[in-house]
Every structure is written in structure tokens, then in C-alpha cells.
Image (cartoon, rainbow, N blue to C red):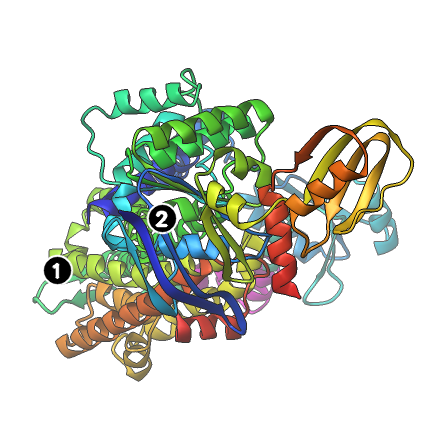
Amino acid sequence: MAVVDVRGITKSFRSVRAVDDLSLSVPQGTITGFLGPNGAGKSTTIRMIMSILRPDTGRIDVLGGDAWTRKDRIGYLPEERGVYRKMKVEDFLAFIAKLKGVTRRGMAERIQQWLERIELPHVAKMRCEDLSKGMQQKVQFAAALVHEPDLVILDEPFSGLDPVNADVLHGLIVSLRDEGRTVIFSTHVLHQAERICDRFVLINGGRKLLDSTIGEMRTQFAPRTVRVEFLAPVEELAIPGVERATGNGRDWRLLLAPDSDPQEVVARVTGFAPVRLVELGQVSVEEVFRQLVAEARS
Amino acid sequence: MTRITVIAWREFRATVFTWAFLLSVALLPIGMVGFAVVLPLFAQATGALDRDPPSGEVLVVAGPQMLDALEEESTRFRRARALVPRATDGSLDEALVRLRADTVLAVVAAEESPPTLYMNGGTLSERNIVRSFVGRAEARRLADDAGQDVDAMRELLDVEAKMVVLSDDGTEHGGMARDVRDVAELGVAMGAELLLWLGVFVSAQYLLQTTIEERSSKIMEVLLSAVSPMQLMAGKIVGLGFVGLLMTSVYGITMLVMLTSLGLTDLLSPWRMVLFGVFYVLAYVQMGSVFAAIGSAVNELREAQSLMTPAVMTMTVPFMAIPLLIDVPNGGLAVALSLTPPISPYTMIFRLMLPANTVPAWEIAAALVVSTAWAALMLWGSTRVFRIGVLMRGKAPGFFELWRWIRVG
């Protein structure tokens, strides 16, 4: 079942088309990454899903209905996020929770539970301005989740976090998926997305370039590198289908020509000289992304 | 509605429960108590207000008649009792040398009429007393020359008519009592207009500040994930409106206490206070919504100044018009200003709060209609600006850009 169903949305700001005829579908219980360079249209798309912006054309269904009527079931961490600096952490979280329709009953326990989940159990009585930047970001994360949403949308959640806190957040996002919630997050840090996402939506120039799972992507995009370890040193390596060969002696890395078949190249390498190891490089999200963006630009 | 209440309560709490606000609200009543009670007690206890009259010698050059007149005046003119007139046989130049050396307080050259008074500095008060002293002495000398009794003439000149002022209800007031009442009536009208302006402006200023703070602390989008821009703006306007209302109530009660202490509670009638409340709300919505919209569009208070200037300048018009309205509160200018937004509520409150004045009912109704329509228009336009402004980043818009937002918002 699709938790988010976007059909042909377009959004322009004056003469700039930020999102152009974009359609996508986010299945329930998945972590879906919105990937794209800065200015690709990720945040605009997310704002439209959140009904903060209205699309010029197209339709968006969220949790089976209009996004505006489902706001209380959505948790949102915007890219531009902050806290009320003078407020106590518990008051801030209670305020956001109330805005999301949570009643007073059990509020304190709920807040404490989320503070423990973000590993900040002791900050409830502290003012937000007394927290470090990283701690504030974790509090903002808790604010997005304190009302126990079914759909969680995180815009660049890892930006500004140190590796330790990024790992905490990573674990939380995975646990949200394991609890049956659907998570969408946008990032331009591609290796992070590769670690965590079940699905990817690649956006560039407001248009969707790819919408698939990691498995589908690896099937669709053949590996472009081959690593070879020869038994004896090789002085020079010239094999048809290889665009560039780098290395010396025993270890070589081959970059395949665009139209070459990896299996044929492997066969040619093993015929060239005795080998200890031949390994087809696994295509990374980053490689796919670069390739698709380059194609789109050309 | 619940969400608007949640936002309103947060705004109210965050603003009111601070030392700065509590102090600013308490300042006026404390100040008034200070002026009315503490200051006179302090002055009495310490003698701080007892100013010593000028004292010293007043040297008279070439004027025996003037010397006699000055001596006579020093016994009759209370503030000049410490002045001692002395004759000198020397020249004016010699007398001025003594004046520069501060061995005498003043020198009077009495060869000609009127005489010339010389002083070496001194305070304004001292100079005025000595000048009066010498002037009175010259008047006495001239009267003596003419065979007239100057003291009798002064008594004649001080005679005033006994005054009785008739009121509409047939009662009679002594002139002095009526004067006090007139001043109090004017004070009530001006005080009410000032109170309206103060409450509205302070609340609007808070709206502007908190909106800018929310933008700069990047909390806006978090809020917009839960509420619409309209709900957010409504919550802020309601919450900070109550802040202004609280402040206005404290000041209003202080005013009421003062009137009670003067026995003038009849100057305020319940229906006038109800109308004050209605015009207060309308004036606040007019200005508050504009300030909220400006706050949503700028990055810092400095950028807001240029956009606020026309609104603030317009608000000075009703105050500048007060001198023109005092004597003709129902004249053509008064009616025109009462029906001109956005100054309509301020002018109308001034006219309504003049207890002796009766504003025609149709004018009150028309002012209410005009003010309500203007408030609705401001709210509509401001909501459109707010909706776009809260999500905009970068350079603050100018007036033309704001107009474009209103059209497309």
C-alpha cells in the first residue's frame, strides 16, 4: 500500500520550475531516500507532501487522503529547523505535541520516553538555548516524533551531526521502520542513504531520474569497474572494452567503456594472464547518481 | 480552534511571564504612586523642594529714590526678603568691578527710567526674582512720583470676577471646580487615546519581534507542519492581543483609581468603556496583522523599520489633531478623521471619552463599520503576505514585492 502517492506535480517560483511533472509512490514500512544535488527540488517536493506548499498542478495523496487532513499522523523534520531558545525542552516538546493533537494525559511520560530514545534523558528541565547544537538537533528530531506519527519525513536529518550522533539517528530511523512506520528522508550525502534506505528516488532539476530499490538499481546499472590481481606482475594492460586501466605490477583497477559487457571483459582479463582474483565492482548509489545527473545534463 | 489556542497561550506565556514585561507593566502604577505619595513625602522629609530665595546685596548706583523703593519692596515682596539694597557713591564701573568679584549679588543703575539691572550669572530663578524685585521697586517709585498708592493699585488689578458655571443638568459649579473638572475630562480623553495607542502599539511590536525571532530561529517550518499559516498568525495575534489587553487593563485601572481619588468616577460611563474595548480590538487587529506580516517577511528588526515607518507615522496623526479637536470635537475635521482608517478608532475614542461631548450615534456606527472593514482588509492582505513570507529566505522585500505577494498569495 502506498503511504505517499504523488501524481504529476509541478511547482514553479516565478520563472524557475522547481518541480516538473514529478510522480512517485512510497510504500508503507519502508525507508525511502530522496536524493539529489542542492536545488534539485527535494525540499520543495517534501513541502508539497507536507501541504506547506501547494503544487501548481498534480495531486498528492498522503496516508490515503489529503495531506492537510493527515498532518497529525505525519512527523516532519524540516531542513531549516530550530527550537524556541528560551523554552524548556519538555515545554517545547509538549507544545509541538499539542499542536499535533496530543492530549495532556500521559504527556510527561511520552516526552521522557522520547528523550530516552534520543539518548538525552536528563535535558527535560533544561532550556533549549543551554543545549549544544547537536543536542538541539536531537530534540528537534524528538519533536518530529513525539506524537507517534505513521509517516516520518526528514529533510537532511544528518546535516550538522557528528558521527556518534549520526549513528544514534541512524539507529532510530531504522527502528522507526521496524516499528512499521514509513520514513522518507532527503539527503545529498549519498553513502549515508545507501546504508539506510530501502528505496531511492533520485531527483535532479525538479525531475525524477530514478525510483527503485537498491536491488533493482544494481540490476539495472551494470558494474563499471573490475578489480584484478594477477599472479605475476604485468607491465602494461590493454584490453578491448576497458576505457582506462590503473595500477602497476599485480593489482589493477579497470574502468569499463560505456557499452562494454562486464562478463566479456572478465573473460578477456583471465585470458590475458593468470589471475589470483577477479572482482566485479558493485555499483554504488553515488556512481548511479553521477551517471544519471551527467546524462540529464547532457 | 484548539491549535490557535495552544499557540495563543504559548505567545502569552512567553511574553508575560518575564521580568522585563512585569516590570514594564508595573512601572506606570509604581511611577504614579511615586509621584503622588512618595515624592512629596521624600521632599518634605529632606526639604529637597525648599528652594532658597536669592540673597545678597543689591548695589544701587545714583538713585536714592530707587533705594527707598527697593527697601520698601524687600519688606513686601516675600521672595526678595533676603535681598539687601545698598547705596554706593562710586561710579557704575566701580560697582561692576565689585559685581564681577562676587561681593554683591546685583547692581542697579538708576540714572534713567527704567533702571538697568546687572547680574553676574546666577540661576534663571534668581535672575527672575531679582528682575521682579527691581521692576516692582521702579513701579513703586513712579507711583510715588505721581502721588499714587501702588499697593492699592495692585490690589485693584488682582480683582477677579466670581464665576458660576451652569451644567446641562441644572447644577452650578464654582469656576475653579469647573476648571479642575474640565482639565480632568480632557485628561480622560487624551489618556484613553494614549492608552489605546500604547496597548495596540506594544502588542503589535511584540508580534513583530516574536515573528522575526521565529524566522531567525528557524522554527517556522516546524510549526507549519502542524498548523496553517493562517492559524499560526491568528494564534499569535490572539495571544499577544491579550498581552496588550492585560497591560491596558493595569493602566486603565490605575487611571480609574486616580479618578476615584479625585471623586470624578462619573467621567467614565460603562457604554464608553465597552466602546473603548470594541475600538481597541479593531485597532489592534489593524495594526497587529500588518506588523505580523512585516515580521514574517524580514530577517531582522532593522529591515522592518523601513516597512513600519508609514504605519507608525500615520498613527501620529490623531495625536497631532488633538489641539484642533478639543474645542470642536464634533466638527468637520473630527468627523473626517473618525471615518478615516486606520486612525478612525483613535480619533473616535478621543471624542467619545470627552464626557461633556455627545458623538452622534450614526458617526459611532459608521466608524465601527469603517474600522471593521479596514481590519478585515488588513487581516486578509497580511495573511497573504504571512503565508509567503514565513517560507521566504534572503533579501527582505520592498513595498512592491509585498504588493505582489498580496496579489499572488
Chain containing mark 2: A
Near-viewer residue (A233 or B256): A233
Name of the residue lying farthest toward the bottom: B332
Q: Mark 2 falls on what kind of element?
A: strand
Q: How many C-alpha atoms fall within 10 Å of the one at disc 2: few (<14), some, or many (≥20)?
A: many
Q: Quadrant of residue A7?
A: bottom left
The stretch drawn in magenta includes residue B173? no
Q: Which mark is residue A15?
A: none
Q: Which residues are magenta?
A: B136-155
Q: Which mark is residue A26?
A: 2
Label of residue B271 in the image: 1
- State the residue lying farthest toward the top: A122
View extreme (front): residue? A271
Residue drawn at the location 25% of the way across and 78% of the way down: B330
Q: Main secondary structure of the magenta part?
A: helix
Whole-percent x and y of residue B66? Answer: 67, 56
Task: Work out whether residue B238 or residue A152 is closer to the camera in this orientation and state it.
Answer: A152
Q: Is residue A190 left or right of residue B295?
A: right
Does residue A138 appear in the picture of this structure? yes
